[in-house]
Image (tube, rainbow, N blue to C red):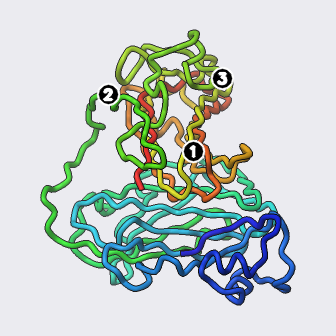
Amino acid sequence: MAVTYTVRSGDTLGAIAQRYNTTVERLVELNNLSNPNMIQVGQVLVIDSQADSGAANGEEGADPSVSRRIGGLLYVFGTPRDVYRQGETIPISLRKTNVSGRNLDLYYPTSQRFEFEAVNQSGRVIWNYSSGRVFNQVAQTVTLRPGQSQSFSFNWNQRNNQGNLVGPQVLTLRGYNVASGLRNQFVSVSIRITGGATTRPPITTRPPITTRPPVTTTPSPGGCQAGVNLLRNPGFESWNTLTSPRNWVSVNVVQSNVRHSGQYSARMGDNPSRSAELYQDIPVLPQRTYRLTFWGREVGSRENGDFNLRTSVLYLNSRGSVIGQSDPDYDENFIPNDRFSQFSFTTGRIPADARTARVRFRFTPRANNNNGVAVDDVFLECIL
């Protein structure tokens, strides 16, 4: 599996190769280096490490991930296992990293940033992420700085585009960056679906009513504990003032009794014509995978909503610099105004230099917006 490494003072190509169990020749080939004795501090190198060879040797249940460099971007795509029972949820993730050494401008004609699809052995696409989804028809250019990453993920329920559960078979999963000029190039892995699911997954049209998430506890030092919420005051029950939830940094946010559970939620867009922000910083473990879950509801009449809500997990190094992020976008078409809906995504493996995660919500109104968004019961956990 390929990783990236940022050259530090005193590094040599030979020392980096030894550290990652590879060769100088392989590093020169992967990074198009003209002189192996000339590497710069801050330069981002692609490293094809041979330290973890389970998937390459065909070990069943191994992590089937693949990396591919396309232009100045390194893509890492995959799923935690290569074998799933019929009906099991399949987490799919794609991370793109700028390894060009310069800023890259990526132009997106709509709010869609990625595409996932499942292809059967006949070459037919049986499922794709975008099927049935509506994307905001507003173009945007996203700039990635050298070494900066963006991650996208989705949990596929093994239902095809017709809503039917797929049968046991071998499938190819593909991941795309849908930026102009790149949308026809993909990275792919193969998985196998076996029979023997114990229950058929239910089809639900509304999110299930759940109990309040577990009380936040502190994980053991150095440990990754699924089910432990790393956030403080995740349900917004404690407030310094009516516009300042305890443990969170907030702008244009107000306490609201339109809530998913408890007494309160945080309503973004107290003034619906102004941007709003809400975030909290949490210590994290590097090279781990995290999952963020929250409940959201549009506040106001559907016809008055015209906004974007960007949910991000940003990764900061020990100097406080942002070195990567995962940030799906939601607009008024995704967030219901008659009930709370649950949203969830996984980060993919976070960078080796990450020391802090910033869970951040950004509300951006458009010209005709008169609505806000209530956010409640935010849950960040380390899962792998």
Percent coordinates x, y for residue 14 in the rendering: 73, 82
Q: Which amino acid does label 3 sit on?
A: Val
**Neighbourhood count class around disc 3 (C-alpha, 10 Å): few under 14, some 14–19, many 20 upward:** some
Label 1 residue SS: strand
Identify residue for label 3.
251
Identify residue for label 1.
313
Percent coordinates x, y for residue 78 in the rendering: 46, 68
Q: Nearer the viewer, residue 203 or 33?
A: 33
Q: Where on the picture, by quarter, is residue 186?
A: bottom right
Label 3 residue SS: strand
Q: Does residue 68 appear left or right of residue 27 in this picture?
A: left
Distance (Cα) linking label 2 and label 1: 22 Å
Which numbered circle lies on residue 64? none
Depth check, mark 3 against mark 2: the one in front is: 2
User: From what the image shows, is residue 218 above or below residue 129?
Assistant: above
- Of callouts 2 and 1, which one flags the residue occurring earlier in the amino acid sequence? 2
- Of callouts 3 and 2, which one flags the residue occurring earlier in the amino acid sequence? 2
Q: Nearer the viewer, residue 71 or 239?
A: 239
